[in-house]
Image (cartoon, helix red, strand yellow):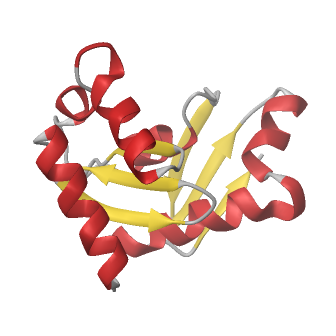
Amino acid sequence: MRLNLQSIQQINLFENITGAKVKDCINDEGLTFIIEEGNIKRALGRDNANIKRLESLLKKNIKLIAYSKDVIKFVTNLIYPIKPDNIDLKDDIIYITINDAKLKGRVYGRGRERLKKLELIIKKYFNIKEIRIE
């Protein structure tokens, strides 16, 4: 995991305002913070006040993802609010079963960019070959 100066500054600001521990920061169209297990409520604050304050300071949309040592729970957190029918791990391949075509399209994203981003994040923390949507 490589962090640049800007990411480190954003992580420090986030931790100082919220008091929650950050595992990783992904800077793309918005900011995505991967938060240590059990720190999500602290990161949000009362009535999401911490996130609203950070969004106004950084002028970016912020998304929080709760990290989990269990790969299936972590994948569930990554694709939230989409609720898959089933998530399985077989031979280092994650199988996500979604019967609704609309929800399946949301997981894929336009040009499969969401699926690629999902794979990139998961491969950072777990020894996974690929993700398959069924």
Of residues 103 and 4, which is closer to you in this image? Answer: 4
Q: Is residue 99 visible?
A: yes
- The residue positioned farthest toward the top in the image shown: 47
Quadrant position of residue 43: top left
Residue 134 versus residue 40 in the image, above or below: below
Quarter of the picture containing the N terminus is: bottom left
Q: Position of residue 14 (x, y in %)?
A: 24, 51
Of residues 58 and 36, which is closer to you in this image? Answer: 58
Is 83 positioned to the left or the right of 4 in the image? right
Q: Position of residue 105 (x, y in %)?
A: 85, 42
Quadrant position of residue 86: top right
Q: Position of residue 90 (x, y in %)?
A: 52, 59
Is 109 positioned to the left or the right of 94 in the image? right
Quadrant position of residue 79: top right
Q: Position of residue 114 (x, y in %)?
A: 70, 57
**Residue at coordinates 78% horizontally, 46% vertically from top-left?**
134
Is 5 positioned to the left or the right of 130 in the image? left
Residue 15 versus residue 25 in the image, above or below: above
